Image (cartoon, rainbow, N blue to C red):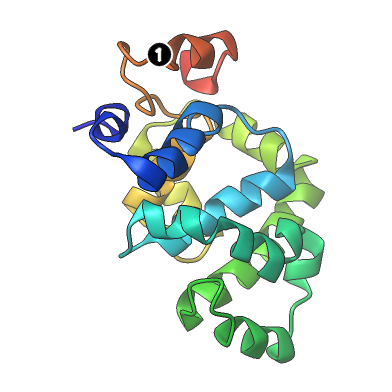
């Protein structure tokens, strides 16, 4: 079942939480490198958990990771790792925390080489999902097939975020996501 259809079956606060993300963020292109990093960080943290858990903790992630500021996160040392491991507002998983810090460092390198993380993504477009997964595994930590697929769908690089009969689909089309190119 598609995310679009699943939301129709939800109710109350759960529906509101998912509807906000679905209608305003999911599948829409992101131009800001810090927000791209934040989305990647959230997708990595979702591994093994529900997306609802991650959506509920989004503000906690923003606060804990300096509003997804790549330069600040890349500079984290042992003190910040300990702080993150003790923060109930995020997923306290050492591997995921280490991946966030190392991936921020990788993005800094990418920015130096390509101008920005967004430009690096654009330079590698188009690729199949399998090619994207290889590229991400070569450059980032904790980036398996499902994480890469969801990240790229969520930022408009791969199709599938919305079904054609979804009310948001035409809004996505108007943004000219990369998967249309």
Q: Is residue 100 left or right of residue 73?
A: left
**Residue at 71 percent of width and 33 percent of height:** 31
Residue 119 percent location from the top left of the image: 70, 34
Confirm whether residue 181 shows in the render: no
Residue 73 drawn at (x, y percent):
73, 68
Relative image position of residue 180 (x, y in whole percent): 48, 13
Identify the residue shown where x is 62% and y is 58%.
59
| Residue 127, image x, y percentages | 44, 31
Most foreground residue, 92 or 150 = 92
> Image quadrant for the N terminus?
top left
Q: Quadrant of residue 71?
A: bottom right
Q: Eyeballing the image, is 80 above or below 4? A: below
**Which of the 4 image quadrants contains residue 86?**
bottom right
The reply to whether residue 139 is visible in this rendering is yes
Position of 1 with respect to 66 (left or right) is: left
Q: Residues within 10 Å of mark 1 (few under 14, many from 20)?
A: few
Judged from this view, the residue extending furthest toward the front is 12
Looking at the picture, tell me which residue is in the foreground, 117 or 50: 50
Residue at disc 1, secondary structure: loop
Q: Which residue is mark 1?
A: 167
Q: Is residue 45 above or below residue 9?
A: below
**Residue closest to the far left:** 1
Q: Is residue 112 above or below residue 49?
A: above
């Amino acid at each position: 079942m598609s995310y679009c259809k699943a939301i129709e079956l939800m109710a109350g606060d759960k529906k509101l939480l998912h509807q906000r993300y679905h209608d305003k963020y999911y599948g829409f292109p992101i131009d800001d490198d810090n927000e791209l990093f934040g989305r990647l960080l959230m997708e990595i943290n979702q591994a093994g958990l529900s997306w609802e858990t991650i959506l509920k903790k989004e503000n906690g992630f923003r606060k804990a990771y300096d509003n997804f500021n790549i330069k600040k996160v890349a500079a984290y040392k042992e003190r910040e790792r300990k702080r993150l491991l003790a923060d109930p507002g995020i997923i306290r998983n050492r591997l995921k925390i280490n991946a966030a810090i190392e991936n921020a460092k990788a993005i800094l390198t990418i920015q130096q080489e390509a101008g920005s993380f967004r430009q690096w993504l654009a330079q590698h477009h188009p690729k199949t999902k399998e090619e994207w997964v290889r590229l991400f595994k070569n450059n980032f930590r904790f980036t398996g097939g499902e994480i890469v697929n969801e990240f790229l769908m969520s930022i408009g690089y791969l199709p599938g975020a919305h079904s054609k009969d979804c009310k948001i689909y035409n809004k996505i089309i108007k943004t000219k996501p990369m998967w249309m190119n």
